[in-house]
Amino acid sequence: MARILDQLETLKPRVIAPSRRSVTDASEIGKERAYLLDLQERGVGTQAARGAGGRCGKQVAAEFHIKYPDWQGAVYIPNEVKRVYEQAQ
């Protein structure tokens, strides 16, 4: 996903129109990248520390709900944590 954001950024867009959020400026690309990298790092670290159980995703989701209160995809975090952990193996 970060590669896609890198490619998008090289286009130097003035406006970004996310599918489920309001139209915004190109700074959204950096915010999205930071969120995804944070999710990847936190998800892999949590899973490694606690094992591959479902609680890890819920823990990360709770943390991200506080850290990124405006993020609308928080319901998907448990599955994303599982996915990034599996990809890191």
Image: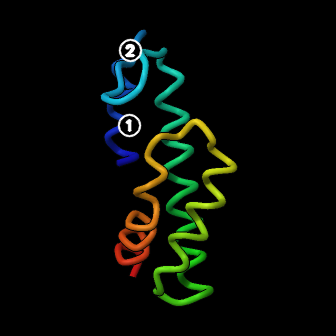
The answer for how far apart the CA atoms under marks 2 and 1 are is 12 Å
Label 1 sits on a secondary structure element that is helix
Instruction: Relative to 24, say whether 48 is above or below.
Output: below
| Residue 62, position as x, y percentages in the image | 62, 61
- Picture quarter with the C terminus: bottom left
Q: Residues within 10 Å of mark 1 (few under 14, many from 20)?
A: some
Q: Quadrant of residue 60?
A: bottom right
| Residue 3, position as x, y percentages in the image | 35, 45
Say which of 28 and 2 sits in front.
28
Say which of 67 and 83 sits in front.
67
Q: Quadrant of residue 48?
A: bottom right
Apparent side of residue 67 relative to residue 3 in the rendered image (left or right): right
Which residue has dot 2 on it? Answer: 13
Say which of 51 and 6 sits in front.
51
User: Residue, x 35% and y 48% (percent of image)?
Assistant: 1
Instruction: Relative to 65, say whether 7 is above or below.
Output: above
Dot 2 or dot 1, earlier in sequence: 1
Instruction: Relative to 26, say whether 5 is above or below.
Output: below
Apparent side of residue 86 relative to residue 51 in the rendered image (left or right): left
Coloring basis for residues: rainbow
At label 1, which amino acid type do we have?
A: Leu
The answer to the question of whether label 2 and label 1 lie on touching residues, with beta carbons closer than 8 A, is no
Q: Residue furthest top?
A: 14
Q: Residue furthest bottom?
A: 51
The mark found on residue 5 in the picture is 1
